[in-house]
Image (tube, rainbow, N blue to C red):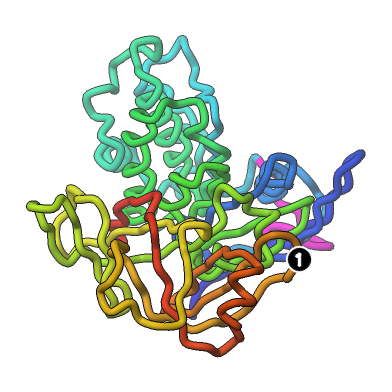
């Protein structure tokens, strides 16, 4: 039976209310996503025990309800923020051991050698904080949080202050923590790149409410969520497997649910997983197979599941390609093709905008 993180909170601030009720897997990485002001950081504050109203239970252990409230300093929670918040007068070793020394001996499940290995910090232990790069500082901050032996790790936009190179450096370590240490992670971000590389379960917030949550491929393609996700992200997230590389034409061929996709060549071995994001505006539809008479390489056979609200210039179409796929077409095209739910239809994918390896596949 899957262990769960159950959380229900109601928090009233001037001009803002958080009202959520969630049941999430107490494993893997849950990404909390939504526009600025949607309540992402407030949710983390509640989980950490910084707000007393509500209920929370993890893997059968109650941390707060009407009769119980475990304060933040007694919760088995690690926290990592946008700023590393390291102690500048202490070297890396002493920063890492700060929380460890304050953790009861019988609660210490993780030790310095474990975290040093997982986060590749062994060669940094005697270094001063001012001699670290931004990425190294975040790895030390992550290690310090882990050395409290948490049952839950909360990460509030931990990569937001880093440049693209440093982000690329850190992300594999976050996934490694989840895989090797089996600590569930709640990860707040507004970066689609981070979502694609990290997410197992997705929670989308808007105006203090949960508008959807669950496996990322199902949540992201919900036609009701355009306002919460934003036009720049609207589309589908698909998990694929690398089949082979065509070096002559610079193409990597992917298997997706028995159908094939092609993307610019990737430095990843056949058999490995690749997660792709397909923007809804890069998907066009046809009622008949093109029989090879097209320059579009990526064509999926699908069925129409839902048709969005038919107002304005365009309309969203939710498709079933074995996993949800989203297309945004004009209302004129909807009328011309006479599209109806249940209809078989071909999805022409003009571009696959974002591609990231997913070692969990």
Instruction: Check the picture and name the quadrant holding the C terminus.
Output: bottom left
Q: Is residue 27 above or below residue 146?
A: below
**Relative to 180, 206 lies left or right:** right
Q: Nearer the viewer, residue 230 or 334?
A: 334
Q: Is residue 68 magenta?
A: yes
Q: Is residue 162 above or below residue 114?
A: above
Residue at the farthest right position: 14
Going 27% across and 56% down the picture, which residue do you hit?
A: 263
Residue 289: quarter of image: bottom left
**Which residue position holds label 1?**
311
Q: Residues within 10 Å of mark 1 (few under 14, many from 20)?
A: few
Estimate the x, y position of residue 159 in percent, counting from the top left.
Answer: 47, 33
**Relative to 251, 36 lies left or right:** right
Estimate the x, y position of residue 52 in percent, counting from the top left.
Answer: 80, 49
Q: Secondary structure at mark 1?
A: loop
Going 44% across and 41% down the picture, which residue do you hit?
A: 146
């Amino acid at each position: 039976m899957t262990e769960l993180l159950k959380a229900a909170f109601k928090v009233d601030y001037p001009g803002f209310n958080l009202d959520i009720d969630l049941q999430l897997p107490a494993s893997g990485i849950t990404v909390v996503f939504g526009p600025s002001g949607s309540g992402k950081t407030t949710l983390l504050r509640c989980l950490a025990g910084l707000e007393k109203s509500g209920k929370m239970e993890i893997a059968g252990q109650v941390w707060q309800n009407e009769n119980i409230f475990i304060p933040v300093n007694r919760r088995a929670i690690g926290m990592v923020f946008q700023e590393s918040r390291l102690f500048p007068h202490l070297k890396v070793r002493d920063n890492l051991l700060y929380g460890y020394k304050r953790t009861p001996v019988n609660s210490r499940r993780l030790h310095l050698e474990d975290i040093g290995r997982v986060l590749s910090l062994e060669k940094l232990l005697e270094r001063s904080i001012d001699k670290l790069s931004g990425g190294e500082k975040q790895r030390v901050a992550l290690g310090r949080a882990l050395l409290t032996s948490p049952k839950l790790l909360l990460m509030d936009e931990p990569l937001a202050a880093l440049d693209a190179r440093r982000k690329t450096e850190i992300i594999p370590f976050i996934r490694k923590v989840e895989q090797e240490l089996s600590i569930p992670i709640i990860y707040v971000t507004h970066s689609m790149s981070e979502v694609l590389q990290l997410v197992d379960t997705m929670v989308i917030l808007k105006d203090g409410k949960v508008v959807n949550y669950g496996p990322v491929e199902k949540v992201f393609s919900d036609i009701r969520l355009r306002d919460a996700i934003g036009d720049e992200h609207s589309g589908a997230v698909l998990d694929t497997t690398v089949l082979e590389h065509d070096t002559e034409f610079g193409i990597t061929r992917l298997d997706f649910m028995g159908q094939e996709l092609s993307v610019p060549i990737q430095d990843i071995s056949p058999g490995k997983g690749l997660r792709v994001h397909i923007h809804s505006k890069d998907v066009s539809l046809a009622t008949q197979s093109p029989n090879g008479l097209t320059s579009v390489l990526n064509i999926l056979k699908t069925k129409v599941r839902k048709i969005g609200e038919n107002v304005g210039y365009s309309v969203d179409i939710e498709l079933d390609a074995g996993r949800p796929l989203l297309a945004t077409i004009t209302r004129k095209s909807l009328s011309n093709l006479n599209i109806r739910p249940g209809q078989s239809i071909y999805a022409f994918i003009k571009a696959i905008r974002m591609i990231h390896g997913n070692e969990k596949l």
